[in-house]
Image: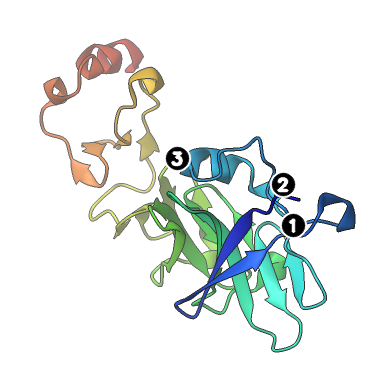
Amino acid sequence: MRYLFIILIISNICIKIEAQDQKNNSSRLLDDINWKDQTICIANLNKVNLENDTLEFVPPYFYRDIKNNKEYYITCSEGYGPVLFTLKYDFDLHSFQDLGCFATDKDSVYSIFLTSDGQIFIPIKEADRATFETFGKSMYAKDKNHIYYSRSGIIPNADINTFKPIYFDFENSTPPLARDKSSLYVWDEILTDTLQINGLKEYLINTTN
């Protein structure tokens, strides 16, 4: 029988876990998936099952060690495949919601972004949990006090009432764009010249009321 492996990275130690046969409630990685490709790996993480007598699965991608009550999350490392990291923050796993580029639990707000090592979570300490909401699956969100960009936090001086993402030219992978009553934004910075992004000026003319 051929064996594949899942890398567990726990407390900065790499441990290879031998996968079980599929007919034994397997955590085996399917042979026909290129797990080392991070994008493919993330799209197929729901096919990985690490539950055993020690690890309990908590949706959407957490595991709890029943014996010592430590908590982990599964993600994908470029060139490796599925990896399990120790949670650095005290998440409330049962109220946790993945909102795309952000996440919440009953008390806190987090940004989520992808690195070559996998997804990481960063607390947004300034966010007001009660009023926090995202702009769909975009990299922008808001609460009663601020506008947020997922990779850097608060966007200074952005207008809460008129801020909205610009959904423009997905085919050519344009950077995150947004606008409010007085400014255009690329990522979290004010865009002063629309000609920097091909076709944006014409798009704004055609979509402005």
Quick one: SS at disc 2?
Answer: helix
Most extreme residue toward the front, as rendered? 1
In this picture the colour scheme is rainbow
Question: Residue at 27% across / 36% down in the picture?
Answer: 181
Question: Would residue 37 appear left or right of 161 to someone viewing this image?
Answer: right
* Disc on the earlier residue, 2 or 1: 1
Most extreme residue toward the right, as rendered? 23
Find the distance from the CA under tag 2 to the CA under tag 3: 26 Å
**Picture layout, residue 145 above or below residue 86:** above
Q: Amino acid at mark 3?
A: Ser
Q: Which mark is residue 129?
A: none
Q: Amino acid at mark 1?
A: Ser
Badge 2 density bin: few <14, some 14–19, many ≥20, Cα 10 Å: few
- Could you say which quadrant of the image residue 17 lies in? bottom right
Quick one: SS at disc 1?
Answer: loop
Residue 133 visible in the current orientation: yes
Question: Residue at 50% across / 65% down in the picture?
Answer: 109
Q: Of 41 and 179, which appears nearest the observer?
A: 41
Q: Of 110 and 158, which appears nearest the observer?
A: 110
Question: Would residue 55 appear left or right of 147 to someone viewing this image?
Answer: right
